[in-house]
């Protein structure tokens, strides 16, 4: 018998489902992976063959399916249509992006400037909003074309050294397409109108899936909350049986009655060793009583550790009901409580604690005495969207011979601030004609991204400049260091930010 709809089970566990995959949506997400490969690697054999056959005079993102195309090409175009809904641009030098037509104003949604496009600006590119001398945003041009978007545009950090624009997948912070994010996009597109279900207000993760208890009990509680147990009222509603009564008291059997209102269940809860006891409320449904149970505390002699006892009591009541109904075996309330406690302790004892050791990746270069060490750090205030940058140069790791600091406005994250500090340090090193430098930062995600060649969408322009600046050195390396080794730079960055805030500078100081 089907108790729960498939549309419910394919939802994520956070939304009250079981996380099963919708086959059609998952297939579309896999097809989008092929389309993304053609978009990212246009010179690969697959892209060259398919584009040579089907994209003669149109771009891949605009071409339509001809009547005589293959089933495979139609599938790739289905994946491409899924991609198009969440594609955007990470700004480098702005040469590839049309300011009015392309989505470049946000890294989480495809946002374009609103309003009708002026005819004489239809071909306006983002590069025209960037000063050719300073390679920074031209404030006057922004005021002329997009005055209402000034702050949003200034918060985008462009490439100062000629890094190109990059088309990105907006549903992932790296900008690269993943089947997982593509699947959830396809599911959202399929769900045209959200279901009005009052049970969606439940906190499914903390109330079920994150509990320290057996997986079968988690699934059992999930079924109860979805009213998917074959108790009397549910069987009558489905016209399976009629006139079903509670096996213990001959009353009308419902989920709330079986677990909380039946005299047998009341006796069981009375015997459970909860601190302060637990008295079910006669008018509450299962969801409200379950929330109350999660706040109960088991008395210390039971010895369950972090495990909770309530699911085992619920399970024991259900088993006692089935034993009496199908095997005519009767268990007293005390036997039911004892069985639940024994099962809970046995399960808790069997759980072998797994110690997870997080090993951070450290990049340690081979250093020589001729190398210079540059340490950079940043301080960031979220409420002001401002940051202070600081960097210093050392000989032999100890002799500091040069230090600098600088405030920056319109900074969206601490990671962006760390990237700006590192880029400014590299620019200073190039200006001082340093040839062998080891750059140290306490931002592990930033150092790892540089070492792996990966990216963050909001750091695209900054990382592009870091890669381009690296060519100017005979030897360059990037190393992660602990915060304790950056005391001087940390203090300088905080002072720079504090001075910036005190002076209430309005105009941004871009780097």
Image (cartoon, rainbow, N blue to C red):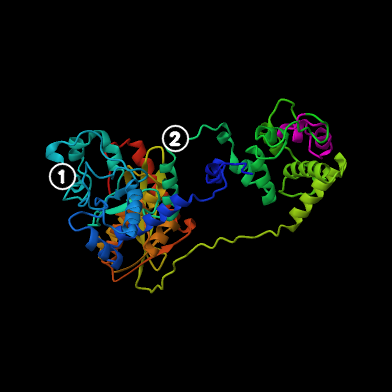
Label 1, secondary structure: give it. Answer: loop
Question: Mark 2 or mark 1: which is in front?
Answer: 2
| Residue 262 within the magenta-colored segment of the rendering | yes
Question: What residue did someone put label 2 on?
Answer: 193
Q: Position of residue 344 (x, y in %)?
A: 77, 49
Residue 165: image quadrant is: bottom left
Residue 166 or 437: which is nearer the viewer?
Answer: 166
Question: What residue did someone put label 1 on?
Answer: 123
Q: Position of residue 29 (x, y in %)?
A: 41, 53
The 10 Å Cα crowd at callout 2, few under 14, some 14 to 19, many 20 or more, is few
Q: Position of residue 59 (x, y in %)?
A: 22, 54
Relative height, residue 486 to residue 435 (above, below):
above
Label 2, secondary structure: give it. Answer: loop
Q: Position of residue 80 (x, y in %)?
A: 32, 52
Name which residue lies at 54% across and 44% down. Answer: 6
The 10 Å Cα crowd at callout 1, few under 14, some 14 to 19, many 20 or more, is some
- The magenta-colored residue range is 252-279
Residue 305 or 113: which is nearer the viewer?
Answer: 113
Please state the total of marks drawn on the protein image: 2
Name which residue lies at 42% across and 49% down. Answer: 491
């Amino acid at each position: 018998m089907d108790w729960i709809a498939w549309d419910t089970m394919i939802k994520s566990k956070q939304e009250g489902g079981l996380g099963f995959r919708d086959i059609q949506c998952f297939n579309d997400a896999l097809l989008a992976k092929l389309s993304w490969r053609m978009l990212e690697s246009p010179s690969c054999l697959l892209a060259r063959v398919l584009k040579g056959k089907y994209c003669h005079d149109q771009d891949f993102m605009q071409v339509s399916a001809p009547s005589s195309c293959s089933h495979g090409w139609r599938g790739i175009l289905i994946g491409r249509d899924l991609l198009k809904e969440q594609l955007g641009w990470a700004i480098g030098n702005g040469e590839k992006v049309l300011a009015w037509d392309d989505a470049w104003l946000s890294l989480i949604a495809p946002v374009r400037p609103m309003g009708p496009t002026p005819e004489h600006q239809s071909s306006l590119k983002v590069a025209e909003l960037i000063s050719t001398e300073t390679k920074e945003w031209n404030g006057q041009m922004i005021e002329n074309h997009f005055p209402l978007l000034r702050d949003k545009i200034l918060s985008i950090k462009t490439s100062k050294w000629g890094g190109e624009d990059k088309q990105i997948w907006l549903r992932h912070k790296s900008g690269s397409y993943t089947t997982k994010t593509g699947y959830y996009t396809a599911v959202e597109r399929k769900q045209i109108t959200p279901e009005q279900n009052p049970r969606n207000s439940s906190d499914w993760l903390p109330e079920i899936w994150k509990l320290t208890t057996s997986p079968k009990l988690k699934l059992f509680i999930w079924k109860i909350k979805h009213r998917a147990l074959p108790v009397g009222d549910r069987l009558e509603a489905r016209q399976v049986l009629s006139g079903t009564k509670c096996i213990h008291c001959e009353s009308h059997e419902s989920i709330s009655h079986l677990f909380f209102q039946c005299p047998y269940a009341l006796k069981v809860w009375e015997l459970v060793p909860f601190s302060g006891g637990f008295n079910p409320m006669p008018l509450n449904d299962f969801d409200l009583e379950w929330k109350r149970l999660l706040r109960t505390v088991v008395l210390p002699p039971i010895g369950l550790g972090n495990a909770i006892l309530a699911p085992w009591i619920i399970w024991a009541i259900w088993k006692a009901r089935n034993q009496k109904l199908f095997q005519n075996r009767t268990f007293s309330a005390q036997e039911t409580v004892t069985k639940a406690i024994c099962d809970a302790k046995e399960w808790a004892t069997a759980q072998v604690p797994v110690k997870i050791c997080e090993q951070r990746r450290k990049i340690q270069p081979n250093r020589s005495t001729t190398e210079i060490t540059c340490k950079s750090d940043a301080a960031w205030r979220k409420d002001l969207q401002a940051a202070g940058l600081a960097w210093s140069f050392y000989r032999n790791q100890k002799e500091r011979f040069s230090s600098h600091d600088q405030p920056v406005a319109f900074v969206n994250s601490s990671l962006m601030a760390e990237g700006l500090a590192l880029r400014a340090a590299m620019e200073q090193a190039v200006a001082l004609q340093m040839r062998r430098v080891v750059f140290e930062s306490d931002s592990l995600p930033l150092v790892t991204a540089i070492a792996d060649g990966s990216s963050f969408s909001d750091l695209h322009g900054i990382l592009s400049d870091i890669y381009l600046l690296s060519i100017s050195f005979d030897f360059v390396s990037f190393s992660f260091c602990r915060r304790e080794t950056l005391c001087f730079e940390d203090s300088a960055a905080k002072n720079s930010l504090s001075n910036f805030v005190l002076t209430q500078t309005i105009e941004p100081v871009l780097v």
